[in-house]
């Protein structure tokens, strides 16, 4: 029994896995974020200053990560 896969199929499967994983993460983040955070990210991406200073990238990432995976990082939800 030879379970080898051709390089082309392996490449396509890897590509689909990466794209699917990123799509799933963005979809999950979209569903779980508060409207205020979505608006803050939108303003940051548009480089607008609609209601005051928009937080920088590390703050935005930390807010999205904590909202998606929880603030306790050694839990099953985070993993």
Image (cartoon, rainbow, N blue to C red):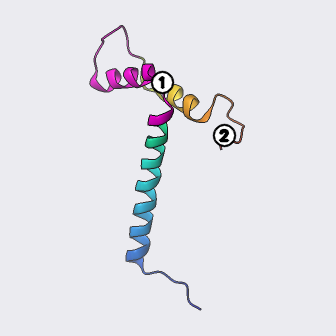
Q: Residue 48 occupies which quadrant of the picture?
A: top left
Closer to us: 39 or 13 = 39
Closer to us: 58 or 44 = 44
In this picture, is 11 found above or below 1? above
Instruction: Identify the secondary structure beneath mark 2.
Output: loop
x, y percent for residue 72: 69, 30
Relative side of 3 to 40, left or right: right
Q: Quadrant of the C terminus?
A: top right
- Residue at horizontal 47 percent and vertical 80 percent from the top: 5
Is 23 in the magenta? no
Q: Which mark is residue 34?
A: 1
Kindly give the residue lying farthest to the bottom in the view shown: 1
x, y percent for residue 20: 43, 55
Kindly give the residue lying farthest to the top in the view shown: 52
- Residue at horizontal 38 percent and vertical 15 percent from the top: 54
Mark earlier in primary sequence (2, 1): 1
* Residue identified by numbered label 2: 77
Instruction: Identify the secondary structure beneath mark 1.
Output: loop
How many other residues sit within 10 Å of disc 1, few (<14), some (14-19) or many (≥20)?
few
Q: Which residues are magenta?
A: 30-54
In this picture, is 75 found above or below 55? below
Distance (Cα) linking label 2 and label 1: 18 Å
Query: What type of secondary structure mainly makes up the magenta span?
Result: helix
How many other residues sit within 10 Å of disc 2, few (<14), some (14-19) or many (≥20)?
few
Closer to us: mark 2 or mark 1? 1
Q: Which mark is residue 16?
A: none
- Residue at horizontal 39 percent and vertical 20 percent from the top: 40
Assess whether mark 1 and mark 2 are in contact (beta carbons under 8 angstroms).
no
How many marks are shown on the rendered structure?
2
Is 33 in the magenta? yes
- Residue at horizontal 37 percent and vertical 21 percent from the top: 39
Q: Quadrant of the N terminus?
A: bottom right
């Amino acid at each position: 029994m030879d379970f080898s896969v051709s390089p082309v199929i392996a490449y396509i499967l890897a590509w689909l896995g990466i794209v699917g994983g990123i799509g799933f993460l963005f979809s999950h983040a979209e569903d779980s974020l508060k409207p205020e955070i979505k608006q803050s990210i939108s303003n940051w991406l548009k480089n607008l200053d609609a209601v005051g200073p928009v937080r920088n990238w590390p703050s935005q990432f930390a807010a999205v990560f904590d909202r998606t995976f929880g603030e306790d990082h050694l839990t099953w939800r985070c993993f």
